[in-house]
Amino acid sequence: MRISDIKATTVTVPLEATLRHSNGAHWGRFVRTIVRVYTDEGIVGLGEMGGGGESAEAAVHGLKPYLIGHDPFRLEELRFKIANPTASLYNNRTQILAAIEFACLDIIGQHLGVPVNSLLGGPVRDRVPFASYLFFRSPNESTGGGEVRTIDQLVAHATDLKTRFGFTVHKLKGGVFHPDYELECYHALADAFAQDRLRYDPNAALSVEEAIRFGQAIEGLNNDYLEDPTWGLNGNRRVRQFIKVPLATNTVVVNFEQLAENTLHPAIDVILLDTTFWGGIRPCIKAAGVCETFGFSIAVHSSGELGIQLATMLHLGSVLPNLTFSADAHYHHLQDDLIVGGKMVYENGSIKVPEGPGLGVTLDEDKLMRYAELYRELGGYPYDRDPLRKDWFPLIPNSRWAEHR
Ligand SMILES: [Mg+2]
């Protein structure tokens, strides 16, 4: 079997509201590039990638000369064909490699008539548990609803999500407001959901000393971990000396060099595996094996997904024996999805792993056209800016907090 064509289509899909984070915001919608890999046997594999608020269409199309004629079963060769480590110094294609890997695994699964997780060691669970992923949100531009800014709004939002989707783990995305206020918010969640577990992720916005202060202030609560409280392996290693809460990262251990460094000189306890950042599902499984060997924990990270990428996260989560923490997903903030059947369904805080051949999801062509049209209309957006704060940009460590009053 050979790859005969590759098509990339940029879409934008509305969110319930603008999601704020320490670097800026998801401006009321996600921009994603949907990748279709065609084969000479008529099988079409699906991939997906992000790119902040921008299209990756041109970058994916640029790889056609490399990939047409490639056998989709040859996944290791794929890595060296388009993302060899020294060439990557000039043309970092890790995320594109991931999107093509997803599509090739989808093709192989469809060809063999088995789900992708059967190609990856087989499932040890058929559902993957998720955390609630709470964001501070600006109001929806058309409805004015969906705001999360005050403590009451935050607790009400978390209660609503718990009621609808059954979450028992709550992740607060912070780094937006002053850490003192976010600490109050975190304590309010701990009070409201005494039986549930909590995690906090300010996207590395805090100084080492603020991170230590925050970490010490939440000791004794039902914490999963503190995620990227500060920037850098060394910064986190300093924080880790002074607090008892485990540290997690999706920023400073995102490749094997960094994983080796963290293994030799531990700074992070929980490695968050992102199928896009690591260059595919298979590197995440390799990394999970290293973590298992050295006693580091793992979880499945979300970099903002539609249904295709969510399927990759579910297949990954289903095959990891050492998955002891709930996964993250932005998914429930979306108003719609592009896959046939609409959005996947949460039950008791978990999502069922697709059982069909390949990734087990099919593109809804009408929705693909509709959301591609919406992208053409609206264009991209600056992921690293906040629509509410003109001319603002953050420092790391940050001191330019948003006003919560
Ligand atoms: Mg994070």
Image: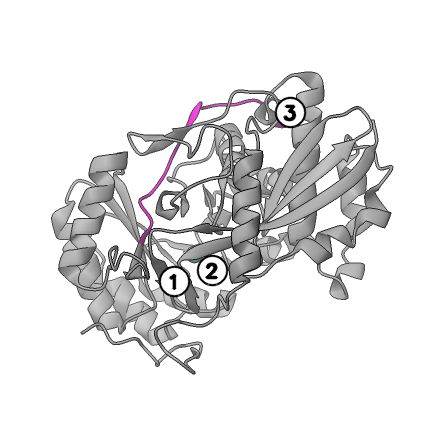
Considering only order in the chain, which callout, 1 or 3, is on the residue closer to the N terminus? 3
Which residue does the numbered mark 1 point to in the structure image?
240
- Tell me which amino acid carries mark 1: Arg
Nearer to the camera, 249 or 315: 315
Q: CA distance from mark 3 to mark 2?
A: 33 Å
Element class at badge 1 = helix
Residues marked 2 and 1 touching at CB (< 8 Å): yes
The structure residue drawn at horizontal position 66% and vertical position 24%, both measured from the top left corner, is 109
Please state the horizontal and vertical placement of residue 200, each as a whole percent of the image: 32, 57
First in residue order: circle 3 vs circle 2: 3
Horizontally, residue 339 falls left or right of residue 326, namely right
Across and down, in percent, residue 369 comes to 57, 43
Mark 3 to mark 1 CA distance (whole Å) = 37 Å
Q: What's the magenta bit mostly, secondary-structure-wise?
A: loop
**Amino acid type indicated by mark 2:** Ala
Extent of the magenta region = 120-134
The answer to which quarter of the image holds residue 262 is bottom right
